[in-house]
């Protein structure tokens, strides 16, 4: 058996194996869905509302099966027919310059993926989310969002890819450390200025008016030493009835962003508890630790990628006549699947631990009961699954379940 045949077989096994594993986990999660509320959450829903939640879970689960099956089938067909490699050959025959050919290759795949998955996005937004009362997106807003996302991907993705490919032409396989620095620099810039640069392209942000809520947030920020530079309300209700809140910025430049749906339906103490949880991440240095872990993983990925670049057998396994940067990246993405699963589980374990710590910070500041009330409201508002499978949680949940968080807050651990 030739080397390219071995690599081809490994890719098929990895792609199919990931799909089968995800479907097994979904099956376990479906079995764990309980028609009865857990005793500690009794009263959270009435019978009709809980039946609606269960139906929402089943509909989304079924939709996930169809979309995952479709995407996996497309990848398998492209690998089996050598489609990825043939596209590479075409791009490099039309644009022999190098950087342009690589960019065209990724652009074609990105646009093709966007077009092929667009019907699923439309169905999810305008059928599923509409059916359960979540969608407020108009077709015009939906289309504009997709076009803006496409433009941003081309601008930012094109610039970063161009720099990385240029570094590869200069440094060869030793490009990995320089490419890592480029990606980390971009990540830092986005962390600092995302809310100022990207968010306004999609949503309107207005300063939170003076009043009880603003006064409480500012007082709590001073008390906990949180470097707050602004509190804003975002018009999330333009697209969904679901609620959210987040922090943006880095170091001594922190901005709180609240969804208008959150401000309208939560009490000031409940909102403060949610924000205290987020401030707990800052005080416990979870954000910094997460960034360091992410950076280490990115460096590791670039190093592994450098080992594949220029490998003719890897390129041939995907049907390419010669090795290119683009085809090597595509092969790496497919071959990295098992490592991705392991690192994903480890990162989620780390994240769930941090969520418990941030909850404890809110409780230490006298907001434990308000946080429980807010978590319950958030779960009901988004019709969250209250009884997920334990193995499914380990693979996919970056946060503990609602029941786990409530029990931990009450126990004070």
Image: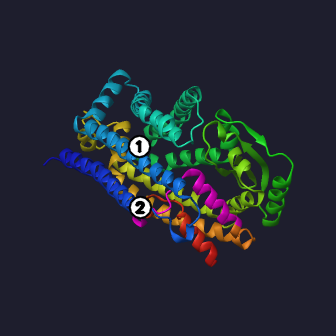
User: How many numbered circles are shown?
Assistant: 2
For the question of whether residue 309 can be seen, the reply is: no
* Residue at the extreme top of the image, as rendered: 94
- Kindly identify the residue that appears in the image at 32 percent across and 23 percent down: 93
Q: Closest to the observer: 255 or 41?
A: 41
Quarter occupied by the C terminus = bottom right
| Left-right relation of 26 to 269 | left
In reply to whether residue 379 is colored magenta, the answer given is yes
The CA distance from mark 1 to mark 2 is 41 Å
For the question of whether residue 344 can be seen, the reply is: yes
For label 1, the SS is helix
In reply to whether residue 193 is colored magenta, the answer given is no
Which color scheme is applied? rainbow
Which is more N-terminal, label 2 or label 1?
1
Q: Quadrant of residue 322?
A: top left
Q: Closest to the observer: 319 or 322?
A: 319
Judge whether 255 appears above or below 125 on screen.
Answer: below
Q: Main SS of the magenta segment?
A: helix
Image location (x, y in percent) of residue 87: 31, 29
Q: Closest to the observer: 323 or 6?
A: 6
Judge whether 129 appears above or below 1 on screen.
Answer: above
Q: Which mark is residue 392?
A: 2
Give, as a single range, the part of the protein colored magenta: 370-392
- Kindly identify the residue that appears in the image at 73 percent across and 68 percent down: 367
The reply to whether callout 1 and callout 2 are in contact (CB within 8 Å) is no
Judge whether 185 appears above or below 95 on screen.
Answer: below
| Left-right relation of 313 to 32 | left
For label 2, the SS is helix
Image location (x, y in percent) of residue 29: 39, 59
Residue marked by disc 1: 172
Q: Quadrant of residue 359?
A: bottom right
């Amino acid at each position: 058996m030739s080397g390219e045949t071995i690599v081809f077989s490994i890719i098929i096994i990895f792609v199919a194996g990931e799909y089968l594993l995800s479907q097994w986990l979904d099956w376990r999660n479906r079995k764990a869905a309980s028609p009865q509320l857990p005793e500690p959450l009794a009263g959270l829903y009435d019978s009709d509302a809980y039946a609606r939640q269960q139906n929402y879970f089943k509909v989304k689960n079924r939709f996930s099966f169809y979309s995952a099956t479709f995407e996996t089938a497309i990848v398998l067909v492209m690998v089996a027919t050598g489609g990825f490699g043939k596209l590479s050959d075409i791009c490099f025959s039309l644009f022999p310059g190098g950087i342009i050919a690589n960019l065209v290759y990724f652009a074609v795949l990105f646009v093709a993926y966007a077009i092929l998955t667009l019907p699923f996005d439309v169905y999810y937004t305008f059928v599923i989310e509409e059916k359960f009362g979540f969608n407020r997106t108009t077709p015009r807003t939906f289309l504009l969002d997709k076009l803006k996302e496409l433009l941003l991907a081309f601008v930012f993705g094109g610039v970063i890819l161009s720099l990385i490919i240029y570094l590869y032409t200069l440094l060869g396989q030793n490009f990995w450390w320089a490419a890592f620095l480029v990606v980390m620099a971009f990540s830092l810039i986005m962390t600092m200025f995302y809310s100022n640069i990207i968010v306004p392209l999609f949503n309107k942000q207005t300063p939170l008016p003076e009043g009880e809520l603003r006064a409480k947030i500012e007082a709590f920020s001073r008390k906990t030493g949180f470097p707050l530079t602004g509190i804003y309300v975002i018009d999330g209700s333009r697209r969904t009835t679901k609620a959210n809140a987040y922090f943006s910025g880095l170091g001594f430049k922190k901005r709180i962003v609240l969804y208008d749906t959150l401000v309208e339906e939560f009490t000031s103490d409940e909102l403060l508890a949610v924000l205290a949880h987020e401030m707990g991440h800052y005080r416990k240095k979870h954000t910094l630790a997460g960034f360091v872990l992410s950076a280490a993983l990115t460096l590791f990925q670039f190093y592994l990628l450098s080992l594949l670049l220029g490998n003719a057998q890897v390129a041939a396994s995907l049907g390419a006549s010669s090795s290119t940067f683009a085809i090597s990246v595509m092969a790496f993405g497919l071959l990295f699947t098992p490592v991705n699963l392991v690192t994903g589980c480890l990162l989620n374990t780390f994240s769930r631990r941090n969520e418990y710590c941030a909850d404890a910070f809110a409780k230490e500041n006298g907001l434990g009961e308000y946080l429980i009330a807010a978590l319950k409201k958030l779960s009901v508002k988004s019709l969250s699954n209250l009884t997920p499978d334990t193995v499914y949680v380990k693979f996919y949940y970056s946060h503990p379940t609602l029941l786990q968080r409530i029990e931990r807050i009450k126990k004070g651990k």
